[in-house]
Image (cartoon, rainbow, N blue to C red):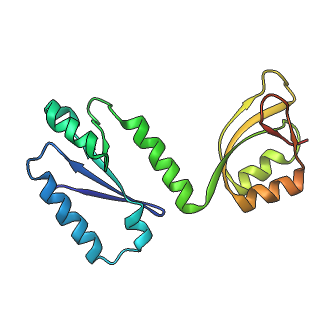
Amino acid sequence: MIFQLNFLQDLLIHIRDVSNPDSAAQKIIVLRTLRELQLPPSLLENMIEVCNKTDLLDSRSLDELKRDGQCFAVSVKKGFGLLELRHQIQDSILSTTGRITKHLKIPTNGPHLAWLYKEATVESTQCDESDPEKLLVDVVMTEASYSRFLSRFGRKKIQNTGVPSCD
């Protein structure tokens, strides 16, 4: 039986080889085993099922798999479906952990960036080409952290961009 379990915080990912003729039976066994482990119900409810090796399926089987819609059809070897899977994993982790992503425009000089590195996960920073005195920062944070950030540094909306700016 070939299966892989990965725990990412509050997320369970079940990856299975759908080119294996026993794939459907293996899925049933894995799901039964997971229930027997008495994992938190939310972990099982939010599980992402990944059907790998779809490049080895005939077109009829692949169409059937896609029609079912219960798993992410991917081919790691060919790179099919990986971007969609990555987005789903990110969305699920953010959702189950109560995190949000924010795109902020902050001054290049000042305590803003240091605060974000301490209180959030800074994913990227880049200079704002239209305003060299500003940085564009992508962060992952809790709603509470975002509220504290706004409370500490203030907020104003930049017209046309919708990017929160703190001065």
Q: Look at 42% across and 38% down and name the residue there.
A: 84
Number of numbered labels in the structure image: 0
The residue positioned farthest toward the front in the image shown: 67
Q: Which corner quadrant holds the C terminus?
A: top right
The residue positioned farthest toward the top in the image shown: 130
Q: Is residue 1 visible?
A: no
Q: Is residue 70 visible?
A: yes
Q: Check the image and report above or below for 128 versus 23.
A: above
Q: Look at 72% across and 38% down and name the residue there.
A: 137
Percent position of residue 8, x then y = 44, 58
* Image position of 127 (left or right of 70): right
Res 58 quadrant in image: top left
Q: Look at 20% across and 40% down and name the residue there.
A: 64
Q: In this view of the protein, which residue sits in the foreground, 3 or 117?
A: 3
Q: In this view of the protein, which residue sits in the foreground, 152 or 31?
A: 31
* Image position of 21 (left or right of 153): left
Q: Check the image and report above or below for 115 versus 54.
A: below
Q: Which corner quadrant holds the N terminus?
A: bottom left
Percent position of residue 10, x then y = 47, 64
Res 107 quadrant in image: top right
* Image position of 114 (left or right of 58): right
Percent position of residue 141, x then y = 67, 54
Q: Check the image and report above or below for 105 versus 42.
A: above
Percent position of residue 156, x then y = 89, 42
